Amino acid sequence: MHNVVNVMKLLLVEDNEQLAHWLAKILEDDGFVLDRVSDGDAADRFLRTTRYDVVLLDLNLPNLSGKGVLRRLRERGDDTPVLILTASGSVDEKVICLSAGADDYLVKPFDARELVARVKVLVRRQLPSRSNSTRCGDLSYDIDRRQFSVSGETLSLTPREHAVLETLILKAKKTVSKPMLADSLGSSSTHTSEDAIEIYVSRLRKKLEKSTATIITLRGLGYLLQASSDDE
């Protein structure tokens, strides 16, 4: 069963470096956190050890094809949504991929807005029992729009600040460890140190100074997001 309290984390599997860079920028600008790999074997390794909300999977990959990655994923009983990205608009190809367990199919070239919209649809399908928003004090989070606000005023955050705060609010009133926060920031490019997590938390505290939501440090354990009011 997919864990719906994780941050919205994607795995992008694309061997065209220029296209992968463009896609990563689009998705990160929209607030998603993602890992990037360029071959099928690497994708298979990542999928065996990390849970993702959506996999964006190219078909023509080195070492192991996209279809091979998809087949192994489903054979393990992993139900992570998979969006196929391919240059082939063949109906037969589409039927084969959907029959193999893909959830959606997007033919290159495609509009960036359509990609983001389709990813959000796949994410939403996993949250049937959740409200589309959650809150802690006067801090609210619109899950569909992936937008934070304090007393109705939009909160401006960097993608990494967003990922940290998203993890905290989806686990509001529960302790979140530094390793868990580091995991929410992705692992394919650089290792996120505990010092870096402290910096992001410090920045968030400044941005939440006017909010009734507060990030509490529990020494040796991690962080806790809670409302200053005992009623919350």
Image: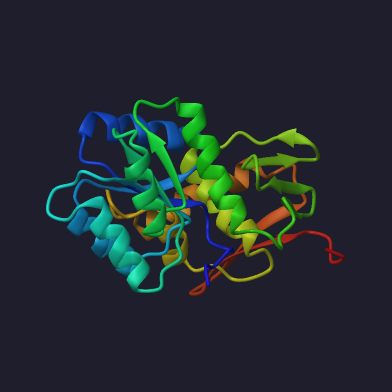
**Taking 24 as reference, is 4 left or right?**
right
Q: Quadrant of residue 93?
A: top left
Q: x, y (%) of residue 174? A: 64, 71
**Taking 141 as reference, is 69 left or right?**
left
Q: Is residue 99 above or below residue 84?
A: below
The residue lying furthest to the right in this view is 231
The residue lying furthest to the front in this view is 92
Q: x, y (%) of residue 6? A: 53, 61
The reply to whether residue 203 is visible in this rendering is no
Residue at image point 51% right, 28% down: 113
Total marks drawn? 0
Along the viewing direction, whichever of 171 and 14 lies nearer the viewer:
14
Residue at image point 19% right, 46% down: 61
Q: x, y (%) of residue 89? A: 34, 33
Query: How are the residues colored?
Result: rainbow
Q: Quadrant of residue 218?
A: bottom right
Along the viewing direction, whichever of 224 and 28 lies nearer the viewer:
28
Q: Is residue 187 above or below residue 89?
A: below
Q: Is residue 99 above or below residue 173?
A: above
The reply to whether residue 227 is visible in this rendering is yes
Q: Quadrant of the C terminus?
A: bottom right
Along the viewing direction, whichever of 108 and 152 lies nearer the viewer:
108
Q: x, y (%) of residue 227? A: 76, 59
Residue at image point 21% right, 54% down: 40
Along the viewing direction, whichever of 51 and 67 lies nearer the viewer:
67
